[in-house]
Image (tube, helix red, strand yellow):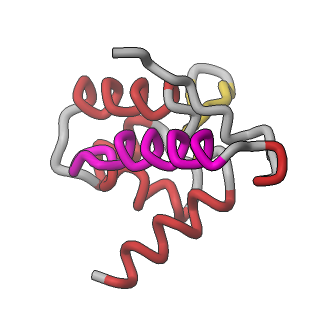
C-alpha cells in the first residue's frame, strides 16, 4: 500500500488537480482523521495550538499514545509543530481542515 503524504499547506486550486487527484486526497484526509483518538486530538487543536502535555490533560490518553497519533497526523500533513524552547506546540496546518472538523462535530 502506498502512503501518500498530503501537502495540505500548499493551496492548489481544483483547476490544477484531476478529479482522481481530488478523490485520492479526500480519501487520504478521511483515513487520517478516521480514528477516534486522532479526531479527539484534532477537536482540541481546533481551539488553539497545544503541547502533548496539554493534550494529555484534556484527553483520556497517555503521552505515548498522543505522540503516536500526532506523528500520524503530521505525516499526513494535517498537523504541524513548532518548537519554543523545550516545548513543542502542535496545530492544524490548514484553516479548511479546521472548518471541516468543526462542521463534522456540529452535525453530530
Q: Quadrant of residue 70?
A: top left
> Which residue sits at x=53%, y=65%?
47
Which quadrant of the rendered structure holds the C terminus?
bottom left
| x and y, in percent, of residue 37 in the image | 24, 46
Where is 36 relative to 7, above or below? below
Q: Nearer the viewer, residue 98 or 62?
A: 98
Principal secondary structure, stretch drawn in magenta = helix
Relative horizontal placement of residue 2, taking residue 93 as reference (left or right): left
**99 w.r.t. 57: above or below:** below
Left or right for 74, reference 85: left
**Image x and y of residue 97, in percent:** 58, 57
Give 16 or 93, whichever is nearer the viewer: 16
- Number of marks drawn: 0
- Residue 28 magenta-highlighted: yes
Front residue of 15/85: it is 15
Where is residue 69? Give x, y as percent: 33, 32
Which residue corresponds to the image point at 80% horizontal and 46% vertical from the top-left?
A: 11
Query: 74 above or below 2?
Result: below
Say which residue appears at 42% left-offset and 24% top-offset.
71
**Does the magenta segment cover residue 52?**
no
**Magenta segment boundaries in residue numbering:** 19-38
Amino acid at each position: 500500500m502506498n502512503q501518500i503524504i498530503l501537502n495540505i499547506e500548499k493551496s492548489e486550486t481544483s483547476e490544477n488537480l484531476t478529479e482522481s487527484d481530488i478523490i485520492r486526497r479526500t480519501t487520504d484526509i478521511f483515513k487520517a482523521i478516521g480514528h477516534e483518538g486522532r479526531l479527539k486530538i484534532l477537536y482540541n487543536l481546533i481551539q488553539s495550538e497545544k503541547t502533548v502535555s496539554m493534550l494529555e490533560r484534556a484527553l483520556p490518553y497517555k503521552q505515548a499514545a498522543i505522540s503516536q497519533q500526532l506523528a500520524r497526523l503530521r505525516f499526513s500533513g494535517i498537523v504541524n509543530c513548532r518548537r519554543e524552547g523545550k516545548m513543542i506546540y502542535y496545530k492544524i496546518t490548514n484553516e479548511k481542515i479546521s472548518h471541516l472538523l468543526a462542521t463534522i462535530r456540529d452535525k453530530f
